Image: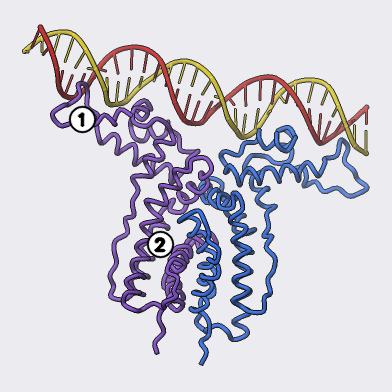
Chain colours: A purple, B blue, C red, D yellow
DNA sequence: GTATAGATACGATACAGTATCGTAATTATA
DNA sequence: TATAATTACGATACTGTATCGTATCTATAC
């Protein structure tokens, strides 16, 4: 990829410089279409048209459709803010409600569906999704629970990973079951999980 | 669909009768390819070739690709056996381990991914998946917990739905996070949830 | 004989990726 | 300063392939 020829400031290559906004725009459109239409239905013709560029412009930067989709996913990052409510339960609920809002955005679940469906054909997509989205979200919840553990709030045998996966996974399952996530669902889940992992008062 | 013209035994339609095994074979292949390749990549050419039929044979039975995919999904049912281990925790663990085995089969998660990814284009697929697979699995777990409630084992304020969704969803999240579901994961999850919903001994 | 099943071939369309042209934007050179 | 060289760009056309759905023919079951 031509962009790999990294140039020092004082050694500008001759010729017309690339417009960085073009690349950003292409990636943004690609990510949106990937989320909305899935990998197979995302077409380079449509990406180009919506980004206001020509296909050769895209191919000058990315060698293939998979390359572009991969790059688009790589731009994703978890946008959910850190929480600090003063209590572990409060933090868990707040973090999960942030997460819930992301899931309920248009195409929130369909991108997950897409990366799972493409696992056999374009595994890089799932790998990147894990790295950019799944991992950071898990880390937020794990952080909350580890701080609770450090404060002595958790049972010694509490399985933090299982707790985290259930809190996150509860949303997936709820959505799969009905397409909706009712208000208060996060609080209900946290209530149960907290009852299962918290150190009991003696 | 021509098959809807239900005939009485003594009123055979003229012409060559259809081979019922042909239909079964087509549906079986379609379901397999839908699971393995996703909706877009499942092609009628390949379905026909692997079922050993011609495409018009398929189109005589189903009006479109979506119709066939929908019909294939409709053939699915939950194959997991009922469990009765003598204890609620044991039942939950056993049921979840059955479920885990289904998920870990080849393409276990990719079909979920496919129906989610296709939600915007072929929503019938997700609807049927909910009806045929998600609902029955949920019912198994809910049944176990309702029986426990009837025996007075659950707290009065226990949210059975949240518990069920977390138990099922924990697998999805675990898979999404790493592509594996470790042995004993079901038992860990049940331990936490049970700790959160069980009536405490006094 | 009749109507349907099944097989092969086909038309239409979409799409990933490539080629070409004229113009734009920059640096290098005379 | 003007020109040459180079790369980027949009527009357009093209190639080869894949796929859905249909047309046309022969074969089959009753």
The residue drawn where x is 82% and y is 40% is B18
Give me the disc on residue B46: none
Which SS class for mark 1? loop
The chain ID associated with circle 2 is: A
Q: Which residue is mark 1?
A: A7
Q: Residues under labels 2 and 1: Cα distance?
A: 43 Å
Between D16 and A148, the one lying in front of the other is A148
Judge whether A77 appears above or below B18 on screen: below
Q: Position of residue A4 (x, y in %)?
A: 29, 31
What residue occupies the far bottom of the structure in this picture? B202
Q: Position of residue B153 (x, y in %)?
A: 58, 84
In contact (CB < 8 Å): disc 2 and disc 1: no
The chain ID associated with circle 1 is: A
Q: Position of residue B59 (x, y in %)?
A: 71, 36
Between A180 and A150, the one lying in front of the other is A150
The residue drawn where x is 85% and y is 39% is B17
Give me the disc on residue A100: 2
Judge whether B150 appears above or below B36 on screen: below
Between A153 and B133, the one lying in front of the other is A153
Which SS class for mark 2? helix
Is circle 2 on the same chain as circle 1? yes
Label 2: how many residues lie within 10 Å, few (<14), some (14-19) or many (20+)? many
The residue drawn where x is 39% and y is 61% is A138
Left or right of A188: which side holds B161? right
The residue drawn where x is 46% and y is 38% is A42
Label 1: how many residues lie within 10 Å, few (<14), some (14-19) or many (20+)? few
Q: Position of residue B23 (x, y in %)?
A: 76, 43
- Position of the N terminus of chain B by quadrant: top right
Discs 2/1, front:
1
């Amino acid at each position: 990829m031509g962009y790999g020829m990294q140039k020092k400031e004082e050694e500008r290559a001759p010729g017309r410089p690339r417009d960085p906004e073009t690349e950003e725009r292409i990636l943004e459109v690609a990510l949106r279409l990937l989320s909305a239409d899935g990998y197979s239905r995302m077409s380079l013709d449509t990406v180009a048209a919506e980004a206001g560029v020509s296909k050769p412009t895209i191919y000058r930067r990315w060698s293939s459709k998979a390359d572009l989709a991969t790059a688009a996913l790589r731009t994703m990052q978890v946008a959910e803010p850190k929480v600090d409510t003063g209590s572990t339960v409060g933090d868990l609920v707040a973090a999960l409600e942030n997460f819930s809002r992301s899931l309920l955005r248009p195409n929130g679940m369909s991108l997950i569906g897409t990366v799972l469906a493409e696992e056999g054909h374009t595994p890089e997509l799932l790998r990147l999704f894990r790295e950019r989205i799944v991992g950071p979200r898990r880390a937020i919840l794990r952080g909350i629970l580890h701080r609770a553990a450090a404060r002595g709030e958790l049972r010694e045998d509490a399985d933090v990973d299982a707790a985290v996966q259930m809190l996150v996974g509860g949303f997936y399952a709820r959505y799969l079951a009905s397409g909706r996530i009712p208000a208060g669902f996060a609080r209900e889940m946290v209530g149960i999980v907290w009852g299962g992992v918290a150190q009991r008062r003696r």
